[in-house]
Image (cartoon, grey):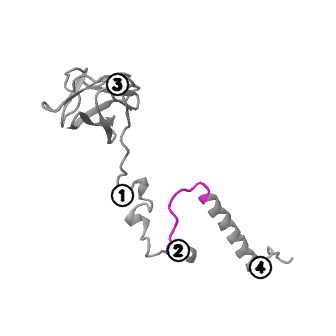
Amino acid sequence: MAARTAPVRPSLARLAGALLALTLLAAGCSEGSSGPEESPAATEASDAGGASDAGGSEEASGPSDGGGQTAAGVPQDPYPATPAPDGFVAPEACSGEGAYYAQVGETATPDLPERAGETLTIEAVGIEGDDAQLTATLGDGSTRPIEDLTLGETASIDLWTISVTSVCADTQQIEFDLIN
């Protein structure tokens, strides 16, 4: 009895099948990708089946996308100031009134209440005329400036709204109330 062998496919058909499979695999992998485009040198090296000097090995240099980290911080816009209501008559700038206060260069005392498991720290960074210059830090996050506030103006920082009640240039102290 003669031994039967499996029919041999032409090599061109095998090559076409492999290219189709690779194309479908590549299309499926890149569908949700939002990462950076590969350089032509890296693509050519990948198509050639070898390593490229352009990117180095992933073992030696770590992930090519930097692990989701950026090289430099992006400056954040300050929290906006809301003007005092129409008809508001500002008292003396240095009234000494306010439930919370901060010396320039220090954080507000007493600590603001925690909300939804989050904390807020207000720091006085300066006084210019009757304007309070403050920064806000939510939890352990980064510090973000607040637009300069004068008496009666408010700023909303996440779940808190503060209103400046006193700006004392002589004592370098800013006072404010928590209104929300």
Callout 3, which amino acid? Glu
Q: Secondary structure at mark 1?
A: loop
Q: Residue at x 22, y 20 (%)?
A: 97
Q: Residues within 10 Å of mark 3 (few under 14, many from 20)?
A: few
The reply, left or right, for residue 124 in relation to residue 28 is left
x%, y% of residue 60? 38, 66
The reply, left or right, for residue 170 in relation to residue 157 is left
Query: From mark 3 to mark 2, how far is it between C-alphas?
Result: 52 Å
Q: Which residue is mark 1?
A: 71
Q: Residue at x 18, y 35 (%)?
A: 104
Give the mark nearer the N terminus: 2 vs 4.
Answer: 4
As displayed, is residue 45 above or below residue 83? Answer: below
Query: From mark 4 to mark 3, how far is it between C-alphas?
Result: 72 Å
Labels 4 & 3 near each other (Cβ < 8 A): no
Callout 4, which amino acid? Pro
Callout 1, which amino acid? Ala
Give the residues in magenta.
30-44
Give the mark nearer the N terminus: 1 vs 2.
Answer: 2
Give the mark nearer the N terminus: 4 vs 1.
Answer: 4
Tag shown at residue 10: 4
Q: Secondary structure at mark 4?
A: loop
Query: From mark 3 to mark 1, how far is it between C-alphas?
Result: 32 Å
Q: Which residue is mark 3?
A: 114
